[in-house]
Image: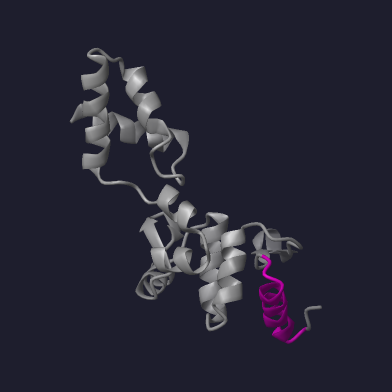
Amino acid sequence: MVDTAGGGIKKIFNYQRQRLFPLPDYDLSGGKVKVTITGKVLDMEFANILAQHKELTLGEIIAIDKVQKGRLLSNNEEKHLRTKKLIEGRKPNYYLSLKVASQTGQKAGYTKNRAFDKAYYLDLIIQFIKHHNQVQRKDIDELLSNKLPGWMNEQEKSLRLITYCQK
């Protein structure tokens, strides 16, 4: 599949792209080359991007594939994808931009990933306290935990809740 001159590597990437599958992963550790090729769609958002954005270069697709797999982007990749308005979010938690989410039918996923402004969370806390007079910290955590962005893990959500409750 991969010829000795290296031209086959590009063919593999393009083949995976055509099938809307994740791009191959290369592991160059231990003095060996290990290639992992996934034969199924991992993320429908990624597949929709490939299907609807035929103009994307292979480099852009590789960078978006990194976002799909939760891998770090280089500063140049991040800057390029932001310039083309393909991603949003903060390092290392990127997600598809509003433009891409709208075009690929991923509007709900975008809103889940996009954090609301602090005023929204503070208003929820104030209304909660007004309705119930006395609340405990665990009640506020329960109120807000499912309202925080989908890309956050439990530890990040907990830290964010602490900052909202301190203000």
Which residue is outermost to the top? 134
State the quadrant of the C terminus. Answer: top left
- Residue 19 position, x and y percent, is 72, 72
Protein image colouring: one colour
In this rendering, would 123 be left or right of 111? left
- Residue 73 position, x and y percent, is 46, 63
Residue drawn at x 67%, y 70% is 20
Front residue of 16/106: it is: 106
Quadrant of the image occupied by residue 160 = top left
Front residue of 117/128: it is: 128
Quadrant of the image occupied by residue 23 = bottom right
Residue drawn at x 43%, y 35% is 146
Q: Main secondary structure of the magenta part?
A: helix
In this rendering, would 129 be left or right of 40? left
Residue drawn at x 43%, y 57% is 94
Residue 122 is covered by the magenta coloring: no
| 101 lies above or below 156 | below
Which residue is outermost to the front? 131
State the quadrant of the N terminus. Answer: bottom right
Which residue is outermost to the left? 167
In this rendering, would 33 be left or right of 161? right
Residue 6 is covered by the magenta coloring: yes
In this rendering, would 80 be left or right of 64? left
Which residue is outermost to the right? 1
- Residue 140 position, x and y percent, is 32, 24
Residue drawn at x 55%, y 70% is 49
Quadrant of the image occupied by residue 157 = top left
Q: Where are the magenta residues, as a range?
A: 4-21
| 132 lies above or below 127 | above
